[in-house]
Image: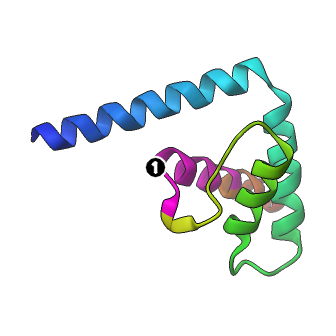
Amino acid sequence: MSASSEIQKTRVINELRGFIKKLLQEPQILERSLEIARRHYAEGNPEGAQARIANEISDTTSVHIPEDPQEHSEADKLFLELLKEVISEEQALY
């Protein structure tokens, strides 16, 4: 494994650790993020939904996700993808 690959993995792990710590300190972030994701995915306009979700999460919680999807970190992308998965699984149950 190359040194740059190791550095990248370490950076992502550190970012995820910081994010998980924030979620543990402010558990309402998860509930609010899920509410936002549910609403945006229910609108039926999946195009740009992740960007809209990221913007609203940034505007209403202490989590900052860049407005431009090109600037999303690996942790940002993972969080948004996991929100989408959870919402999809919830909808499949009904």
- Whether the magenta-drawn stretch holds residue 75 is answered as yes
| Classed neighbour count for the residue bearing mark 1: other residues with Cα under 10 Å, few (<14), some (14–19), many (≥20) | some
Q: Nearer the viewer, residue 44 or 69?
A: 69
Q: Residue at x 79, y 81 (%)?
A: 45
The residue beneath circle 1 is 74
Q: Residue at x 51, y 25 (%)?
A: 17
Q: Magenta: predominant secondary structure element?
A: helix
Q: Nearer the viewer, residue 48 or 59?
A: 59
Q: Secondary structure at mark 1?
A: helix
Residue span colored magenta: 71-83
Q: Does 59 appear above or below 10?
A: below
Give the quadrant of the N terminus. top left
In screen coordinates, is 10 left or right of 79? Answer: left
Q: Residue at x 72, y 50 (%)?
A: 86
| Residue 60: percent from left, percent from top | 86, 46
Q: Does 32 appear above or below 50?
A: above
| Residue 78: percent from left, percent from top | 54, 49
Residue 88 in sight here: no
Extreme-left residue of the structure: 2
